[in-house]
Amino acid sequence: MANHLVIVESAAKVNTISKFLGKSYKVEASIGHVRDLPKSQLGVDVENNYEPKYITIRGKGDLLQKLRREAKNAKCIYLATDPDREGEAISWHLYHSLRLEGKEVKRITFNEITETAVKEAIKNPRDINTDLVDAQQARRILDRLVGYKISPILWKKIRKGLSAGRVQSVTLRLICDREKEIREFIEQEYWSIETLFKMGKTKGFEAKLDKVDGKRIEICNEEEAKIIVEECQSGNFVVKERKQSERVKNTALPFTTSTMQQEASKHLGFSTQKTMNVAQQLYEGIKIDKKEMGIVTYIRTDSVRIADVAKQAVRDYIEKEYGEEYLQDAPIKKEKVQKVQDAHEAIRPTYIEKTPEELKPYLSKDQYKLYHMIWHRFVASQMTPAKFETHTVKIENGRYQFKASYSLEKFPGYLKVYRLDENKKQTKAISVKEGEVLEAIQISPNQHFTQPPARFSEATIVKTLEENGVGRPSTYAPTITTLLSRGYVTKETKVLYPTDLGEIVNNIMLEYFDEIVGVAFTAQLERILDEIASGNIEWKEIIKAFYPNFNKTVEKAEKEIEHVDLTEFTDIPCERCDAVMVIKYGKYGKFLGCNNFPECHFTKPWYEEVGIKCPVCKDGEVILKKSKKGRIYYGCDKSGEECDFMSWQKPTGDNCPNCGDVLIEKGSVKTKKIVCRNTVCNYGKENKTKSDI
């Protein structure tokens, strides 16, 4: 009969761990948190030293009764929740909810769900780490104060169902700031000159103009480019110098939560939420030959550290499968600030001998893809760097110097097992000698325009948040999911755009809560939370320092923010009941709805006239429209067969005097310019600056 009780978080772990521990251990699951702050009120007594008010989560009563019965009969209770701050807090809440005072209670953690790891944890229990619990409490209460104080303002001033969060609001600001940069960006013209040289019986090779009179070249317009081409055509191209060197491409480090999310987004097309869901399945256990086992280590970590046993196992595997020459001599160390999550290992397979190909029959398609990437990345992390032979050829023609460079793979190293798309391209060798006079087949002047910064994808926003120290690995996926579900952000072709609603909320946060949405402030809070987790700061001190000024700002915002009336009456009749149509605000912005709602549910798209005649058909009116994902653009009200005008930027109503295309407005109020929509037309883009090259 079982006389030991082990409590884990997830029900998916119960069967697996039960088989590891045998009949004397009863394994039960808490199914996540059992206590939390109440949803119906603030839950923090700001008048009584910010004491939190914890209550049993609705629906957990029967579960707690069952766990209490099991605990009463158990000789020893092992709290085996996840090995992070959240897991530590769940164990602490379980201790109090199950009334375990006076009982023998031990805290155990394991980084992987394997028989060895679980039994080792049982042998080496510890007490609950109250510093980690305090860090989690501080985060939870800070987030509660921000969310429950600001969100009601958004409900009153805009509409119900909106929310503001500490990390969420910073992420929204980053996305909105990037969109503003793109809207205000004015592209500038520049030119490059490439020459195709004859080389034996091959198609030849290209070299690009690099310097003029020994200095970097900037070509601002077509006239300058033509002069250079003409001078080069009248001169001789002579190989002045050939250089050969070796370049080393460092070994890829094993996955952290952030890098796993980024790589899965870029190469597998997974959303951050999907990546974490699939990774959780791999961690909790996969049924293999009627036996369940976790096949990757704990998936919430910002460490690249590897356990010595796992390191030795993978090094033995590399030596056996690929040879000693592929084995890394001294593992690469990543310098970083020590964090609490660094106590965990990097994400890696629990059994190196279980290759993706061997486990493929037991995994779903998505599980296989992610496990394949995790396994290969881990193996690659202990292999030698890749070596490339780099070649540079400098060619002179009078005062002009052209340069061609290429690299050849000398030794694949870790690329033998972890070669992603960008590593597949191989360059052909250029066989010319110093002093050789080359025959130019073609000299091509090419027009270019500077490009605005790219919009964020899920991968790049995660990378930006991590680089700025905002949030934690476990927060990235739910943060992005919340922004999408609230309608603040929309995703189109894997790119994130702010919606009208997102812009409105962001502007309010910037005006009244600029500190909270500041990247530096949020990153500083994360560092303070780390100090709490290390036992260096008392957790309530951070709340005391934050709340008084924050509350004053909330009171000011409540008084000063004007109501954003999202309902506007029109003179358009409803096509079903003849009532007047009103402009309403939905998840993706404005639409026309019947004022007789809920009796009449008729709706139709809403288009705002901008007071400009269509520059294409000259008859229609330019109107604001939205893509299916909520992105604003300008079109003609006669769009369809009559007119195909469309522009992402506001048109002026006039046509370009150079090419006849549409003129548009670009830039901010202070830097606004009228430029041609045609990207190959230079009208309005002539002022090239050195920094734009």
Image (spheres, rainbow, N blue to C red):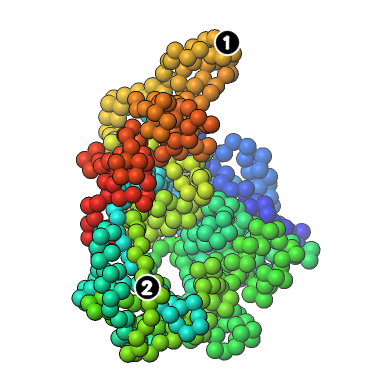
x and y percentages locating residue 309 in the rendered image? 57, 78
Q: Is residue 457 left or right of residue 352?
A: left
The quarter of the rendered structure image containing the C terminus is bottom left
Say whether residue 157 is left or right of residue 200. Answer: left
Q: Is residue 690 left or right of residue 606?
A: left
Q: Taking 533 as reference, is 491 above or below it? A: above
Q: Is residue 378 visible?
A: no
- Relative image position of residue 614 (x, y in whole percent): 39, 30
Q: CA distance from mark 1 to mark 2?
A: 69 Å
Inspect the image, locate mark 1, and give the three-letter code of the amino acid beneath it.
Cys
Q: How many neighbours does mark 2 have within 10 angstroms: few (below 14), some (14-19), or many (20 or more)?
A: many
Q: Earlier in the sequence, mark 1 or mark 2?
A: 2
Kindly state the secondary structure of the residue where label 1 is placed: loop
Q: Residue furthest top?
A: 578
Does residue 573 sit above or below 150 in this rendering?
above
Identify the residue shown where x is 29% and y is 41%. 657
Residue identified by numbered label 2: 195
Q: Quadrant of residue 192?
A: bottom left
On the image, the x and y values in percent for residue 2 come to 73, 58
Please indicate, yes or no, whether residue 596 appears anywhere in the rendered image: yes
Of 568 and 84, which appears nearest the observer? 568
Q: Are marks 1 and 2 in contact (CB under 8 Å)?
A: no
Q: Nearer the viewer, mark 1 or mark 2?
A: 2
Residue topped by disc 1: 577
Q: Residue furthest front?
A: 234
Residue kind at label 2, given as amino acid type: Thr
